Amino acid sequence: MTMKKRRTETAKRWTKLLAAPVGVLGAGAMVLGATHATVTADTWNKDNTIKSGSWTKSTVKSDQGTKAVVTVPDLMPGATGSAKVTYTYEPGKSEGKESWGQVVLKDISVTNGSGDVVIIPSQSELAKHLHLKFTVKQGGKPEVKDLTLAEWYEKTNEDKNTMGRTALLRAKLNRKDAKAPENKADVALEWRLDADAPVGAANSGLKFDLGAEIDSVK
């Protein structure tokens, strides 16, 4: 074989070698390197765990369930009446830094003698002459508020923030002792219609919601 032919064959062999896939050559190199890897020391922080604690969500219960506390079908001038309800607060320990309980009066509406809804309840004759007195005791000294229905309506709509509601009493709850006296609100409601209530107040009706809620401060 001449020198020229030898050079040609050598060039062809190098060309085939260079044409081999890079990945194949690289894989071979990686396997070769891995066979020489050795762990010489280690340390482990084992059995890391996270467990959830025990907590409850806040709840409020009424001794009257969800039924109406007041149902008066035929109120006459000079008539009086009363009703009672007890709210029990169970503040959740995981909700904010502290919990407050409040008894709330809201959503007052009135109908006139024709059965039509009075757009502004405080302008109805019934609202002007019907008195509602609330006595709320929650741990400390009882809170007493005695207003006409018209005045109550105005109080629940004093500004855009009241949204048709007003708190009869707001007090801090005891998260440590579920049976603490401040976790119970005793509410007494008394009503009376003025003896001189005009005929314009006759055959009228009113509705309102009374309840309690927990406000958790973050």
Image (spheres, helix red, strand yellow):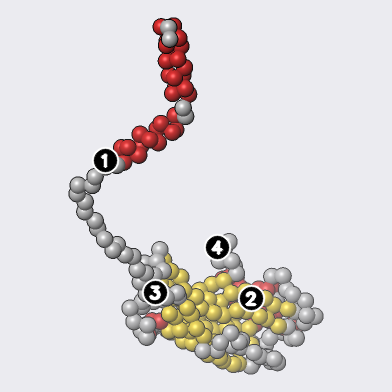
Residue at which label 4 appears = 161
Q: Is residue 201 above or below residue 78?
A: above
Q: Tell me which label, 3 or 4, sits earlier in the chain.
A: 3
Q: Are marks 3 and 1 in contact (CB under 8 Å)?
A: no
The numbered disc on residue 108 is 2
- Which amino acid lies under the numbered mark 4 shown in the image of this protein? Asn
| CA–CA distance in space, label 3 to label 1 | 54 Å
Q: Tell me which label, 2 or 4, sits earlier in the chain.
A: 2
State which mark lies toward you, 3 or 1. 1
State which mark lies toward you, 3 or 2. 3
| CA–CA distance in space, label 3 to label 4 | 32 Å
Q: Secondary structure at mark 4?
A: loop
Q: Are marks 1 and 2 in contact (CB under 8 Å)?
A: no
Residue that protrudes farthest toward the front in the picture: 1
- Which amino acid lies under the numbered mark 3 shown in the image of this protein? Trp
Q: Secondary structure at mark 2?
A: strand
The numbered disc on residue 36 is 1
